[in-house]
Image (cartoon, rainbow, N blue to C red):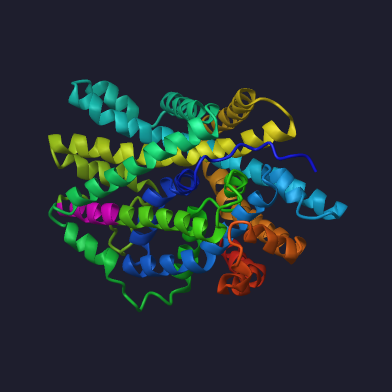
């Protein structure tokens, strides 16, 4: 077999911050709090934490392991899990499909991230006396969507073109600490506002009668699953960049822990902010108790709340949407990196050419969605995340635990942990991923 040509992270911290940055995205800061607010607050939080432990973390270890076994791109990594022609072909197809799904996700993610940039710029324009320009940025239009989508993609290109060490690792080291500082600072500020304690109580005090609700359990399972970028080859790609000296279960635990911490802190910010908005006259729940504007919470309820804070609201609004943009970029760079590295290794093209090829394809898909928004946007989101993402994760789990020989799997894990065969992790995890995780993933697909 050819010598691995994949780049590598310079340090364990670099991998952890980059992988956590990939996992931490709009889904954590927008999706998780919205789900919590719509599904019982503290009850959803408790079940979500359980699902991270019993589903998301074991699957994260699986995908990182696939990447590190051969230290190649996902197509080659999955192809090399077996010597048999059928499984090699199936693995290669799975890798290609996973990367296509990832590109579809990036295509709508870039549009949404463009909206976040718009709402970040708007308060600054109001502050300097340009209200008409600010209004253009927050009004839905094809021109606004195109301009901000292209700008966001160029930001992502800037990071990925610089490579793994000088681009992804360096910017992850800068952006992830900044994200935590902004989250903690904004949460502390919101908690001083009138009405915040009511939201805090809803978030932290679970109603145990709701915990057994099957719908809540399935939604928490889905949120835990999607929050860690599983099923789309990202963690496989980053796993290929991980040193053989690193303990995969421990390193994956750090990634899952950071991702979960960001989601938890986002809840501390968003749910109290919703009740601050309510105390300032903004309606957040309908008469039947359902959350209003759940799918557009950060573009409707929160800006309305920021408006009630006067001049201070401009700075709070800027800080909040800056936080969202940082989370979006840390995810988008991993979404672009995975297909770029696959193209680099499979087609033998240089990094710069690969970046522009993938970017132009994704931008073309985003443009098509923008000009056919009502028909395509929701369809692409549903197809890629509700259906294909869990299906591909199921395929990856089967490939690792049913196709790869167990002695090869043990050998890969022992590289960073020589005594892992004597641990409880090894006694439980392979069989858990082989039997239990597929059943849980099938539940998510069925619910979707």
Q: What x and y, as percent, mark residue 126? A: 21, 26
Q: Give the side of residue 336 with respect to residue 192, left or right.
A: right
Q: Is residue 108 at least partly visible in the picture? A: no
Q: Residue at x 21, y 56 (%)?
A: 275
Q: Which residues are magenta?
A: 268-279
- Residue in the image at 19% along x and 21% along y: 128
Is-magenta flag for residue 271? Answer: yes
Q: Position of residue 206 (x, y in %)?
A: 31, 72
Closer-to-camera residue (290/51):
51
Would residue 285 be visible to someone looking at this image? yes
Dominant secondary structure of the magenta stretch?
Answer: helix
Toward which corner of the image does residue 420 lie, by quadrant? bottom right
At horizontal 25% and vertical 53% (from top left) the residue drawn is 274
Q: From the viewer's perspective, is residue 254 above or below residue 70? A: below
Placement of 24 over or under 419, stated as above or below: above
Numbered marks: total: 0
Specify whether 136 is left or right of 349. left
Residue 249: image location, x then y, percent:
54, 61
Instruction: Compare residues 9 and 263 and report the one nearer the observer.
Output: 9
Q: Is residue 100 above or below residue 364?
A: below
Residue 133 lies, in percent from the top left, at 28, 21
**The residue positioned farthest toward the right in the image shown:** 85
- Magenta stretch holds residue 442: no
State the quadrant of the C terminus: bottom right
Q: Quadrant of residue 397?
A: bottom right
Q: Residue at x 59, y 57 (%)?
A: 416
Name the side, left or right, on which 215 lies relative to 61: left
Q: Quadrant of the N terminus?
A: top right
Q: Compare residues 60 and 14 and report the one nearer the observer.
A: 14
């Amino acid at each position: 077999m050819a010598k691995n040509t994949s780049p590598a992270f310079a340090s364990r911290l670099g991998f952890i911050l980059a992988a956590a940055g990939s996992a931490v995205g709009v889904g954590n800061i927008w999706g998780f709090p919205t789900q919590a607010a719509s599904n019982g607050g503290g009850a959803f939080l408790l079940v979500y934490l359980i699902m991270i432990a019993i589903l998301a973390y074991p699957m994260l270890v699986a995908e990182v392991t696939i990447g590190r076994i051969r230290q190649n791109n996902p197509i080659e990594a999955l192809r090399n899990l077996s010597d048999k022609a059928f499984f090699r072909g199936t693995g290669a197809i799975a890798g290609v499909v996973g990367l296509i799904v990832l590109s579809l996700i990036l295509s709508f993610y870039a549009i949404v991230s463009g909206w976040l940039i718009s709402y970040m710029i708007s308060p600054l324009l109001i502050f300097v006396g340009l209200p008409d320009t600010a209004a253009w940025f927050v009004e839905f239009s094809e021109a606004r969507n195109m301009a901000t989508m292209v700008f966001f993609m160029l930001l992502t290109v800037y990071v990925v073109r610089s490579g793994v060490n000088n681009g992804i690792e360096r910017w992850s080291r800068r952006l992830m600490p900044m994200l935590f500082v902004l989250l903690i600072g904004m949460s502390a500020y919101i908690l001083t506002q009138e009405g915040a304690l009511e939201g805090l109580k809803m978030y932290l005090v679970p109603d145990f009668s709701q915990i057994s609700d099957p719908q809540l359990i399935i939604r928490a399972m889905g949120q835990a699953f999607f929050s860690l970028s599983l099923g789309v080859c990202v963690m496989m790609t980053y796993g290929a960049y991980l040193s053989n000296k690193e303990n995969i279960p421990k390193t994956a635990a750090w990634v899952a822990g950071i991702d979960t911490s960001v989601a938890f802190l986002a809840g501390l910010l968003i749910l109290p902010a919703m009740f601050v908005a309510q105390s300032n006259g903004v309606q957040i729940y309908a008469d039947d108790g359902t959350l209003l504007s759940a799918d557009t919470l950060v573009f409707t309820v929160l800006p309305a709340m920021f408006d009630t804070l006067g001049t201070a609201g401009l700075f709070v609004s800027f800080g909040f949407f800056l936080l969202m943009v940082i989370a979006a970029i840390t995810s988008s760079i991993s979404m672009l990196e995975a297909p770029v590295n696959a193209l680099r290794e499979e087609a033998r093209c240089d990094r710069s050419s690969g970046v522009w090829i993938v970017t132009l394809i994704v931008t073309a898909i985003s443009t098509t969605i923008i000009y056919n928004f009502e028909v395509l946007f929701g369809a692409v989101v549903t197809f890629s995340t509700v259906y294909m993402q869990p299906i591909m994760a199921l395929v990856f789990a089967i490939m690792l635990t049913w196709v790869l020989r167990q002695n090869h799997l043990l050998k890969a894990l022992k590289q960073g942990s020589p005594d892992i065969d004597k641990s409880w992790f090894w006694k439980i995890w392979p069989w858990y991923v082989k039997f239990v995780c597929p059943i849980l993933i099938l539940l998510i697909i069925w619910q979707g």
